Image: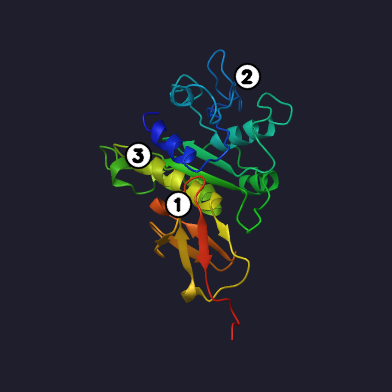
Amino acid sequence: AEQVPVFIEGLNATGLDYHIGVTTMDMSSSGARGGLIAQNGTPKFLTKDTPNLIGLLAGRLRAGENGSPVERGREATMAALNSTAGGTNGAFLRENSLLNVIFLSNEEDQSATTTDYIAALDALKPKLPYGDRGWQAHFMGVMPNDPSCQTAEGGFSSPGTRYIDLATASGGTSESICDANFLRALSNVRARVLELVTEYPLDRKPVEKSIKVLVNGVEVPKDEANGWTYRASANSIRFHGSSIPRAGARIKVTFDPEGLK
């Protein structure tokens, strides 16, 4: 909750039109299953134009621990998303949007194992034009063999391997909940989201070594941490870290096309 300003400021810098909703992993109460949390008199999901956006989102993340002790995050995700078409979470999910799910938990998921959640999310959000999945899952929880999550007895708390599987399948991030500061974890989630939505397609196949990228007239280095990389499978440029363009930036890519004589 304390790191919400950093997360929101990064999203706003790109000019993205986003919807943000928060739900718990409590699936024991019929009234709470997948329902988006909302303070009295406020909308169920938040946008960049919502008054007091940062304060409202921070408050919703402080959901408390009064619900069921059985965490069923994957089930709660599908319940929330499947109730958007005319349901209690109506208008949250949009057909042309990239879906990002952030799981925040200190335990393994106990959702029903009869559902293929990867297939269910693929069906809900088809692939993007460049072949990437139309959804990403991110996990902030107990990582396997994480020394910062080790108990006094030398064992480990409950690692969220089922959440990690979703993150791995979708190209999302997995971060430790046992870090003293969530800034790095949340910044990594934000960076992965922005990398995908600021991808720049090329109109022809380039000779890769000839590519030159400029943002607002300044050359950007080829660097997977704070620069750009070329994705041959999608024939596109993907930006990373501090080089992700801000809203209204002018992007210029020059290259020699393949087959040029």
The amino acid beneath tag 1 is Ile
* Quadrant occupied by the N terminus: top left
Q: Residues within 10 Å of mark 2 (few under 14, many from 20)?
A: few
Give the vertical position of 101 relative to 29 (above or below).
Answer: below
Q: Residues within 10 Å of mark 1 (few under 14, many from 20)?
A: many
Of labels 2 and 1, the one closer to you: 1
Of labels 3 and 2, the one closer to you: 3
Using the image as rendered, state which of residue 55 and residue 146 is in the foreground.
55
Count how many numbered circles sit on residues in the image. Answer: 3
SS of the residue at dot 1?
Answer: loop
Give the vertical position of 99 relative to 46 (above or below).
Answer: below
Q: Residue at x 59, y 79 (%)?
A: 258
Task: Compute the Cα span from label 3 to label 2.
Answer: 33 Å
- The reply to whether the C-beta atoms of the residues labelled 1 and 3 are less than 8 Å apart is no
Which residue position holds label 3?
183
Residue 259 place in picture, x, y as percent: 61, 82
* Quadrant occupied by the C terminus: bottom right
Upstream in the sequence, badge 1 or badge 3?
A: 3
Residue 39 place in picture, x, y as percent: 53, 16
- The reply to whether the C-beta atoms of the residues labelled 2 and 1 are less than 8 Å apart is no
Residue 191 place in picture, x, y as percent: 44, 48
Using the image as rendered, state which of residue 243 and residue 249 is in the foreground.
249
Q: Residue at x 58, y 25 (%)?
A: 36
Of labels 1 and 3, the one closer to you: 1
Outermost residue toward the front in this view: 217
Say the numbered circle drawn on residue 31. 2
Which residue position holds label 1?
244
The amino acid beneath tag 2 is Gly
The answer to whether residue 154 shows anywhere in this view is yes
Q: As drawn, is 253 to the left or to the right of 58?
A: right
Task: Compute the Cα span from label 2 to label 1.
Answer: 41 Å
